[in-house]
C-alpha cells in the first residue's frame, strides 16, 4: 500500500492500525507535505521503500532523517505523484486540501484502489474524478467517518433505492454559542473540537460547519445521490455517523465510537474485517443519542455549501478554493471567524458574474477554476 499524507492525523492513525497487524501490510511508499523529519520517522516506522516530500525546501531534512536507511527519497509535487503511482493494492489518499487532488487523481486514473480521506478531490473535480474511476475500473473506498458509515449502512444497495442519505455533524465547539459570540471566536476556540482530533484546516471547517457542506458535495459524487436526497443532522455525541432511509420506511445507521481508526481499518481490510485498536462502542455508557437541525443563521457556511451543490457546475470548486484561502487567513489571525464566510461568498459572487462557474469536464479545467478563485480570495484579503 501507499500512504499519501503520512504525517497528518489520518496518516498517523493509519500507522497505528498497521502497527496492530504488522505482517498484513507492505508499505511501498509514503508522502508528506512540509515536515521532512516527521516523514522520515514515518517512512522508517512503516518500512517504506520510497518517501516523497512535496516541499523541496524540506528535502534536506528528509534526507538527514533517513540517513543510513534503504529508503529512496525525492521532493516536489511530481515526486508525490510518483509515490501515488508506486506498485500497490491500495492508496490511502489523506493529503489535506486541494494539494491532494493531483496524486489522488493519478492513482485513480491508473486503476488503483483508493481509500479516500481527501474530500477536496471530489469537491473540486468530482465529475472528472468519478468518470476517470469508471474508465480505469478504480475502486474508491470512502475513508471519512461519515462516508464510510454511509457506505457500510448502504449494504451494497443501489443508490436508486435510497430515499434520503443523512450525514451527521457534532456541531463543533460553537454548537450552543450565539451568533455574536461565534463572530468574536478566536483561533484557539475554533480549534477546540469537542470530539475529534484533526488537522487545523478541517477543524476550523468543522467549527463553521463548512466541513459538513463539503461532505455533502463529496457524497453527491461518491454515491451518485442527488442534492435533494441529501441531509444533515447535528448529533453532538458523534456516535451515529450516517443514516440511510429506504422507500419502505426502514432506516439503517452507521455507528461507531468517534475514532478514525475504525473507518481506516474498514478500508485497509476491505472486504474483510480486522481489529482497529479503537475502543468498542458502549451505548449504555453513552446513555443517550440526540439529534437536531443545523441552524443556518448561525452557521451560514453550511447553507452556502448547499447552495453551491444545488447550483452545480464549478460553484463547489470556487467555494472550496476561496474557503481554503480564508481559513488560512483566519489561522494567521488576519481576519475574524465570521469573515471566512464573507470572503467565500464574495468570491462566488465575483466568479459567477465573470462566467467562471461552468461545469468542468477535466481535472485541468477544475484546477483552473480553483486557481482563479484562490486569486480572487487573495485579492479580497489584500
Image (tube, rainbow, N blue to C red):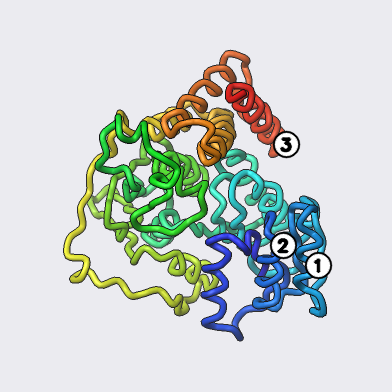
Q: CA distance from mark 3 to mark 2?
A: 29 Å
Say which of 236 and 113 sits in front.
236
Q: How many marks?
A: 3
Residue 345: x %, y % from top left: 48, 24
Residue 333: x %, y % from top left: 51, 36
What residue is rendered at 44% in x and 59% in y?
Answer: 197
Say which of 81 and 286 sits in front.
286
State the quadrant of the N terminus.
bottom right
Q: Is residue 181 above or below residue 285?
A: above
Q: Which residue is mark 1?
A: 63
Q: Which residue is mark 3?
A: 364
The dot on residue 111 is none
Side of 100 relative to 269 (left or right):
right
Side of 9 relative to 84 (left or right):
left
Q: Which residue is mark 2?
A: 36
What residue is rendered at 76% in x and 57% in y?
Answer: 58
Sort mark 1 into few (<14), some (14-19) or many (20+) by Cα contacts within 10 Å.
some
Amino acid at each position: 500500500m501507499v500512504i499519501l499524507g503520512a504525517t497528518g492525523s489520518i496518516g498517523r492513525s493509519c500507522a497505528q492500525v498497521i502497527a496492530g497487524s504488522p505482517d498484513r501490510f507492505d508499505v511501498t511508499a509514503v508522502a508528506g507535505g512540509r515536515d521532512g523529519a516527521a516523514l522520515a520517522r514515518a517512512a522508517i516506522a512503516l518500512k517504506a521503500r520510497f518517501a516523497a516530500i512535496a516541499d523541496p525546501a524540506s528535502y534536506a531534512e528528509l534526507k538527514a532523517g533517513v540517513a543510513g536507511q534503504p529508503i529512496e527519497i525525492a521532493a516536489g509535487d511530481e515526486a508525490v505523484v510518483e509515490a501515488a503511482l508506486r506498485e500497490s493494492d491500495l492508496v490511502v489518499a489523506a493529503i489535506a486540501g486541494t494539494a491532494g487532488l493531483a496524486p489522488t487523481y493519478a492513482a485513480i486514473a491508473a486503476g488503483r484502489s483508493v481509500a479516500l480521506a481527501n474530500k477536496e478531490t471530489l469537491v473540486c473535480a468530482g465529475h472528472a474524478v468519478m468518470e476517470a474511476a469508471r474508465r480505469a475500473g478504480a475502486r474508491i473506498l470512502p475513508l471519512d467517518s461519515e462516508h464510510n458509515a454511509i457506505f457500510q449502512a448502504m449494504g451494497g444497495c443501489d443508490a436508486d433505492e435510497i430515499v434520503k442519505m443523512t450525514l451527521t455533524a457534532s456541531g463543533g465547539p460553537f454548537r450552543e454559542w450565539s451568533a455574536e459570540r461565534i463572530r468574536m471566536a478566536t483561533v484557539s476556540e475554533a480549534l477546540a473540537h469537542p470530539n475529534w482530533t484533526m488537522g487545523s484546516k478541517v477543524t476550523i471547517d468543522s467549527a463553521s460547519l463548512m466541513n459538513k457542506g463539503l461532505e455533502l458535495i463529496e457524497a453527491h459524487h461518491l454515491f451518485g445521490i442527488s442534492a435533494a436526497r441529501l441531509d444533515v443532522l447535528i448529533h453532538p455525541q458523534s456516535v451515529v455517523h450516517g443514516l440511510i432511509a429506504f422507500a419502505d420506511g426502514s432506516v439503517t445507521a452507521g455507528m461507531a465510537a468517534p475514532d478514525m481508526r475504525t473507518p481506516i481499518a474498514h478500508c485497509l481490510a476491505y472486504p474483510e474485517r480486522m481489529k482497529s485498536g479503537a475502543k468498542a462502542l458502549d451505548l449504555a455508557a453513552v446513555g443517550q443519542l440526540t439529534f437536531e437541525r443545523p441552524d443556518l443563521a448561525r452557521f451560514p457556511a453550511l447553507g452556502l455549501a448547499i447552495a453551491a451543490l444545488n447550483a452545480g457546475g464549478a460553484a463547489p470548486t470556487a467555494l472550496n478554493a476561496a474557503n481554503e484561502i480564508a481559513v488560512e487567513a483566519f489561522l494567521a489571525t488576519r481576519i475574524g471567524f465570521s469573515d471566512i464566510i464573507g470572503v467565500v461568498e464574495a468570491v462566488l459572487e465575483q466568479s459567477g458574474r465573470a462566467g467562471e462557474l461552468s461545469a468542468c469536464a477535466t481535472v485541468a479545467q477544475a484546477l483552473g477554476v480553483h486557481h482563479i478563485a484562490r486569486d480572487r480570495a487573495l485579492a479580497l484579503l489584500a
